[in-house]
Structure formats: structure tokens, C-alpha cells
Amino acid sequence: MTTSKINIGLFGFGVVGESLWKVLQGNSSLQASIKKVCIKHPEKKRYAHDALFTTDAAVLLIDPEINVIVELIDDADAAYNIVKQALLSRRSVVTANKKMVAEHMSEFLSIQQQTGASLLYEAACCASIPVIRNLEEYYDNDLLQSVSGIVNGSTNYILTRIAEDGLDFAASLKQAQTLGFAESDPALDIEGIDAANKLSILLTHAYGIVVAPAEILTGGITALQPEDIKYAKEKGYQIKLVAHAKKLANGTVAALVLPQFLNAENRLYHVHNEYNGVIIESALADQQFFNGKGAGGFPTASAVISDLSALRYNYHYEYKKWRGEQPLRLAEDFLLKVYFSSAFDDEGLPFPHFEDIEEWSCSGERTVLVGNVRYSSLLNDTWWKKAGASLILLPEALEQLSAPRVPANRRKWSLVLGY
């Protein structure tokens, strides 16, 4: 897009939309302004003039003076229709809707190739952290070893309050909702789905892999038990919901979202409250760490502003890794070292799913198993999701992904009583 001024058609005037409007009111250097805003509830009190608003999406999508659509609504299906129409009309689009982008990435790649319009979505992953453009522009996938991160501010806030204040899950969630870090329906966050959506997007820019979020092994934080928190404290760990993408020796990429125990040596250990953190590891540069607010109106609006600024220079994601001659694919199986806690009696414990068991402990009414399980066992079965069970990655879980499978007749079993 080459223009002296960006005329924005904005969909949504919630926390992020209103924050964007406020920022643009005092930002003359960007030469961007919001011409019209499409809203769903016209009766709601807003601090902008009534003439700015409409409930008719077509007003924005057919206006020839509007050259950029910014989509900031919370309905992924409606957002998809808006973004698709805008791109097909050759208008560039900026969006923060990670679910919509993740679920329709393949189609959006095709439409961008067809029309030349640009779809930018830095705000869809980690809000204020510029992770997408860095992966897109800076890191070659032959050198990129891994991307891991706390990419959901809501769950991180909840886990921080549990660890630091001793609140239970329900009280921590309510506090997060009161502060605007969690939605009234928080399922996407606390079940890990939001993090999986973001990881799906990051995989495209890190390794050129286009994969539906549903294909990524995903677990949330709702199953965590008080005994798990106690175990973490006794070991000096923090529990975080971590998204991982790691390149294996065979050239495939392991991808998963699960709670994980982290020790103080891991930079993500020190990421608290609504903040996000991302560690990018490459063969030449070792580890680089990005940290910033992952939730809130202004942090997200900052990423939208960055994308708008990029459009002034005709910026497009090039998707070079996706276009490569030998695109990478997701790994089908590997070993993960996990902690499994259950209220089941011995007959109900999932011994057959463990390749080996390093710790088997009992305390009160719960039993803990620590050992290696296969990724495929977690992806294709639900034994670890039964009521009363919790599964958490150990700190070293992804450091040993190339470990060979232990033959069944050589599996190690040991018993440790108590924590």
C-alpha cells in the first residue's frame, strides 16, 4: 500500500479498539486516522462522537476512502468474514484475532497471493512482544533450534496469584476477570486453546509449518491440584503454561502446549502476572529472550500501531520458510518427561503409558508418577485428562527429545515414598 495517509475502517471498539483510537488521537507522525467504526451494540456508552460509529459492516467494506481494515472483535467467525471480504477487495488488514488467523491460515495465504493485499497480525501473538516479525525476518529455519514461551497473559496471571498469594484457582481466575486479563468465558485461556492458536501462528513464521491448532497437543491449567503447587514449592519450581516448538535431529518439529515446572535457570520462571515471555534459540546466537505485557488494551494497541506503520512501507509477510523447497513438518512421536498426579488407586494408574518411571510417590489421597511417556500417547489418548488427574512437564522435558525409546523389558521402575 502506497499512500500519504492511512484511512482506517475499524471493527470493534472494546478495550483494544478504544485504546487504538486514543493513541491515534495524539499520533500525528503515523498519518493514520479512524474514519469509521463498526460496532455490535450501539446502545453502549462510548467516549467518541456518535457519528464515528455504525452497525453496518458494508459501510466500511465498500468505502473507497478506507484503505486499511483493522479488525478487533471477539467473534472469530464474524472476524473471518470481515477479513476475507477486505482482502478480496484488495484492502490490507491488521487483526489481533489469533483464533481466526490460526484456523484459516492456509486460506489467507492463498488470498494474499491472489490479491497482493497484506494481512498483518503481530497483535495476535503476545501483544506488545514483536515476536512474529522477528521470526519472519531474522531467523533462518536451518539455524532456528526452538521457540518456547508463555504466550497467554491470563493463565500466567492466574498461576502467579496461586503461587505468590496462595489463592485457589477459582479466586485467582475471578481476580483476573475483574482486572480484564481474562474473559467472562475464560475457557479458551485456561484450557490452553488460546496458546495453541498462537503457537500455530508462530510455527508458520518460525518453520514454515501450516497446521491447525487442533493438531497440536494441548493441555490447560484447570486440572492443577493443590498438591501440584506444593510439589512445585518443595522442588523450587514455578508452574507455567508453556508453548513449545523445537526442531529435532531428524528435521521434524515438536510442538505442544502444556503446563510445565520451570526452575530458576529458565528465563520464563521469572515472567509473572499478565506478562508474556518468549525464548528463541538459534544455533549461532544461542538464546534470545523477549518479555512484555501480553494482555491489556494499550500493549495490544502498540502491536496494531506497529503493523499500521509497516503498511506505510508496503510491508507483507513473505512466508519464505513456508514457500521453501522442503517445508518442515510436525514430529509424530518422541519422549517427554512428565509428572503425573492422580487420585486413582493403584489399579487405575496409567503404568502402561509410561516408558519408564523414575519416581512413584504417595502422599495423602494422591499418587505421583514421574517418568517418560510418548508424545503419541498423550496426543491420541485421554488417560491423562481424566477427572482428578494432572499432568505437568518436567523442566528438562524438551532437552531430551532425541532420547531413544527404552525397550519394554528394560524399563526402570523405582519406588519413592512421600514427596
Image: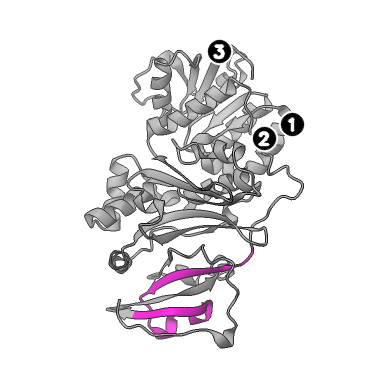
Dot 2 crowding, Cα within 10 Å, few <14, some 14–19, many 20+: some
The image shows residue 324, relative to residue 145, as above or below, that is above
Q: CA distance from mark 3 to mark 2?
A: 24 Å
Mark 2, residue position: 318
Residue located at (68% from left, 28% from top): 88
Q: Amino acid at mark 2?
A: Glu
Check disc 2 and report its element: helix, strand or loop.
loop
Residue 340 coordinates in the image, percent (x, y): 42, 72
Q: Residue at x 74, y 31 (%)?
A: 114
Residue 327 belongs to magenta span? no
Labels 3, 1: front one = 3
Q: Which mark is residue 5?
A: 3
| Disc 1: CA contacts within 10 A as few (<14), some (14-19) or many (>=20) | few
Camera-side residue of 59 and 275: 275
Where is the N terminus found, in terms of image quarters? top right
Tell me which label, 3 or 1, sits earlier in the chain.
3
Secondary structure under tag 1 reads helix
Mark 1 is on which residue type?
Gln
The answer to whether 201 is drawn above or below residue 348 in the figure is: above
**First to last magenta residue range:** 332-361
Name, please, the residue furthest toward the right: 325
- Residue 114: mark in rendering: 1
* Disc number placed over residue 381 in the picture, else none: none
Q: Is residue 78 above or below residue 395?
A: above
Q: Position of residue 16 (x, y in %)?
A: 41, 30
Q: Is residue 357 magenta?
A: yes
Labels 1, 2: front one: 2
The answer to whether residue 57 is visible is no
How far apart are labels 3 and 1 at the CA level? 25 Å
